[in-house]
Amino acid sequence: MSEQITEQVNDSIETQLPIVTYSDVATKRTLRHPAAQIKATLEQAIAQEEAEHAQAHAAWQALLADIQAQIEHAQAHNAANPDDQIDVPELPAEPMIDMAKRRACYEVKNVEVDLELTTEAQDSHIVYDDDALIAYHHPKTIAHSDEHIEAIKRERFKTQRAENVAAITVEVDKMLFDGDELSQSRMTRAIILMSDTDTQLWVLANNEVVEVTREQLKQACVLSAQKQSELWV
């Protein structure tokens, strides 16, 4: 008989899960454990918290009927006995989960906002996704005018256009030429100074040094100018 009791106790100990708290989650984050491990620990802590809350809530509900009966009895007594008042008990507070503690352990993701193009003024704030266990941090924004936004967009367009022009390359006879504005100027000068039979050493886009003809440079220059015109529109 004693052996059976011992086995039952051992089985109970083996099946009992270790207690995991939000402090354990914070510790793992401080020690830079892998994100997957931190999330798994958080999920375990949440599961245990919700199980404990379910038990506490069930016990609270079981008390309500008895406490309500005591309240009604006290109220009836006080109404019938003005000179012999008794204390009226209060309903116990409903058990609640402290979401602040849970949310403090969520993965933090900073929401990327183009602060130069915002149209609404908002203070920095956090949006919690309780299903994904993520806290989205939104930055403070201001309401920019339409004129400001248009000016910013125009400047960005010009900057991007300049970068695109600087990155122009064209292919002539299986040779890849740089086609930016400086390269076009160099090709134009070479074309003017070269005869149709001349050749010249030229550094290609891949830094390979090759010998090119006037006609090849002319083709490369024309193609580069065409690409730049397309970008400029």
Image (cartoon, rainbow, N blue to C red):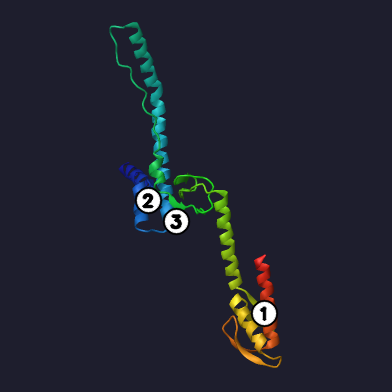
Label 3 with label 2: CB-CB less than 8 Å: no
Task: Indicate left or right for 165 with 71 as reference.
Answer: right
Q: Residue at x 59, y 62 (%)?
A: 157
Q: Which mark is residue 25?
A: 2
- Across and down, in percent, residue 233 comes to 67, 65
- Across and down, in percent, residue 177 comes to 63, 80
Depth check, front residue: 63 or 181: 181
Q: Residue at x 39, y 17 (%)?
A: 69
* Amino acid bearing label 1: Cys
Say if 86 sits above or below 90 in the image: above
Could you tell me which secondary element the residue under label 1 belongs to?
helix
Total marks shown come to 3
Which residue position is annotated with label 3?
A: 36
First in sequence: mark 1 vs mark 2? 2
State which quadrant residue 166 falls in.
bottom right
Q: Mark 2: few, some, or many residues within 10 Å (few <14, many ≥20)?
A: many
- Whole-Å distance between the Cαs marked 3 and 2? 12 Å
Task: Indicate left or right for 74 with 164 as reference.
Answer: left
* Amino acid bearing label 3: Ala
- Whole-Å distance between the Cαs marked 1 and 2? 62 Å
Could you tell me which secondary element the residue under label 2 belongs to?
helix
Depth check, front residue: 156 or 71: 156
User: Is residue 20 among what the camera can see?
Assistant: no
- Whole-Å distance between the Cαs marked 1 and 3? 55 Å
Which residue position is annotated with label 1?
A: 221
Nearest to viewer (mark 1 / mark 3): 1
